[in-house]
């Protein structure tokens, strides 16, 4: 793959800034199942509703035009690939990983993450942990999370989807105001050398 990144100075957004995030959004059955879980948890725990997604790279600050240009370059360099959900887990006192579905890492996913980090000058980001959050609620006690893991695990058994595009979303607070900026398809098949 001949790939030369365009160089810009991107920084990470903070809680008081709005930036952009690049996502893989599940399609078909996986999207429907995850939407249902997110809405149910939001209703039960008075939490925000959001689109289920795997974050490729979060909190990019730059003009929308720059972010779109870089995202198009990344998307055009990769083919569609499968993502399989493995288990539900949580992190204590975490907002964005309060309760999440861990997704199986693959070489293809690792390569696209590495390329995106290079493209946006974010090589020093923490290691990527592929996951789909299903609850954003920082003050949820671990005892409740453990019960939710047990309750919702059967609903994600054997759930998978094909990552077929990269979506750009605004981010920041409030979560309910996140909006889709654009969507860029991955190639449906391997490109000839």
Image: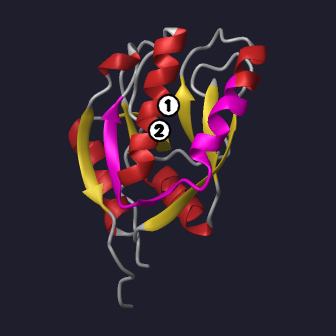
Q: Residues within 10 Å of mark 2 (few under 14, many from 20)?
A: many
Task: Mark yes or no: residue 171 visible.
Answer: yes
Magenta residues span: 148-170
Task: Identify the residue under disc 1.
Answer: 37
Q: Nearer the viewer, residue 151 or 27?
A: 151
Assess whether residue 163 is covered by the magenta stretch: yes
Q: Nearer the viewer, residue 50 or 77?
A: 50
Identify the residue at image location x=47%, y=28%: 38
Q: CA distance from mark 1 to mark 2?
A: 5 Å
Task: Identify the residue under disc 2.
Answer: 34
The image quadrant that residue 153 belongs to is top right
Identify the residue at image location x=37%, y=45%: 8
Question: Is residue 114 positioned above or below 92 on the image?
Answer: below
> Marks 2 and 1: in contact by CB < 8 Å?
yes
Residue 84 x, y percent position in the rendering: 58, 57
Question: Is residue 16 positioned above or below 29 on the image?
Answer: above
The image quadrant that residue 101 belongs to is top right
Q: Secondary structure at mark 1?
A: helix
């Amino acid at each position: 793959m001949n790939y030369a990144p365009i160089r810009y100075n991107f920084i990470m957004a903070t809680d008081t800034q709005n930036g952009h995030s690049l996502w893989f959004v599940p399609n078909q059955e996986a999207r429907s199942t995850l939407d249902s879980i997110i809405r149910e948890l939001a209703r039960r725990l008075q939490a925000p509703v959001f689109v289920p997604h795997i974050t490729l790279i979060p909190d990019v600050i730059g003009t929308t035009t720059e972010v779109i240009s870089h995202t198009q370059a990344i998307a055009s360099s990769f083919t569609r690939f499968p993502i399989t959900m493995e288990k539900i887990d949580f992190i204590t006192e975490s907002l964005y990983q309060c309760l999440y579905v861990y997704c199986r890492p693959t070489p293809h996913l690792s390569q696209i993450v590495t390329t995106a980090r290079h493209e946006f000058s974010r090589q020093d980001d923490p290691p990527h942990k592929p996951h789909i959050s299903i609850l954003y609620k920082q003050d949820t006690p671990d005892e409740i999370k453990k019960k939710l893991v047990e309750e919702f695990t059967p609903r994600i058994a054997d759930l998978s989807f094909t990552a077929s595009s990269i979506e750009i979303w605004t981010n920041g607070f409030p979560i309910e105001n996140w909006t889709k900026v654009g969507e860029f398809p991955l190639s449906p098949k391997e490109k000839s050398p």
